[in-house]
Image (tube, rainbow, N blue to C red):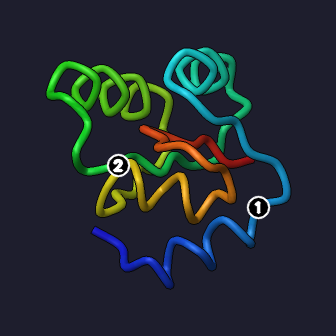
Amino acid sequence: MLSSNEISHLLNDYSNRIIGKRAVLKAVASGEIKCVVLADDVDVEMLNQITAVCRDNGVKVYQCESKRELGKLAGIEVACACIGLF
C-alpha cells in the first residue's frame, strides 16, 4: 500500500484520470489506462473484479488507505473507490 504522499505524487505524474468503477473497468479493457489506484476498503467483489481486469490487461494496481483518502487526494469532495490514470 502506498502512502498518501506517494499517491499524491502518482496522481500528479498523470495528467488524465478516470474516476469510478464502471468508467475505470471500461477504460482498462479498452487499453486507455496506465495504472489504477484502488482504495483498500472496497468490498471484496470490487477488489477482485478490478484486480482481475487490470491483471488481464497488464495494468499496475496501487492501493490507497481508504476511499475517503483517495477522494481527498483526487481533489473531489466524496469518497472514491478507484481512479484510472493515463
Q: Which residue is mark 1?
A: 14
37 or 28, which is in the foreground? 37
Q: Amino acid at mark 1?
A: Tyr
Tell me the residue at 66%/23% (across/down): 27
Mark 2 and mark 1: Cα distance apart in space: 18 Å
Q: Residue at x 82, y 48 (%)?
A: 16
| Residue at (31% x, 25% y) in the render | 52
Residue 14 falls left or right of residue 24:
right
Q: How many C-alpha atoms fall within 10 Å of the one at disc 1: few (<14), some, or many (≥20)?
A: few
Camera-near label (2 vs 1) is 2
Q: Which of the 4 image quarters holds residue 50?
A: top left
Name the N-terminal-most of marks 2 and 1.
1
Q: Are marks 2 and 1 in contact (CB under 8 Å)?
A: no
Spot occupied by residue 79 in the image (x, y as percentages of width and height): 47, 44
- Residue nearest the viewer, comparing 58 with 71: 71
Compared with 9, 50 (above or below) is above
User: What amino acid type should be assigned to the residue bearing mark 2?
Assistant: Ala
Relative image position of residue 32 (x, y in whole percent): 73, 31
Residue 46, image x, y percentages: 28, 23
Q: Judge left or right: residue 29 versus residue 21.
A: right
Q: Residue furthest front?
A: 77
For the point 32% across and 33% down, the residue is 51
- Residue 17 horizontal/vertical position (percent): 74, 45
The quarter holding residue 13 reads bottom right
Q: Residue placed farthest to the bottom in the image?
A: 5
Q: Residues within 10 Å of mark 2 (few under 14, many from 20)?
A: many
Q: Dot 2 lies on which element?
A: strand
Question: Is the residue 69 above or below the residue 4 in the image?
Answer: above
6 on left or right of 28: left
Per the image, the residue denoted by label 2 is 39
**Mark 1 secondary-structure assignment:** loop
| Depicted 60 relative to depicted 65: above or below | above
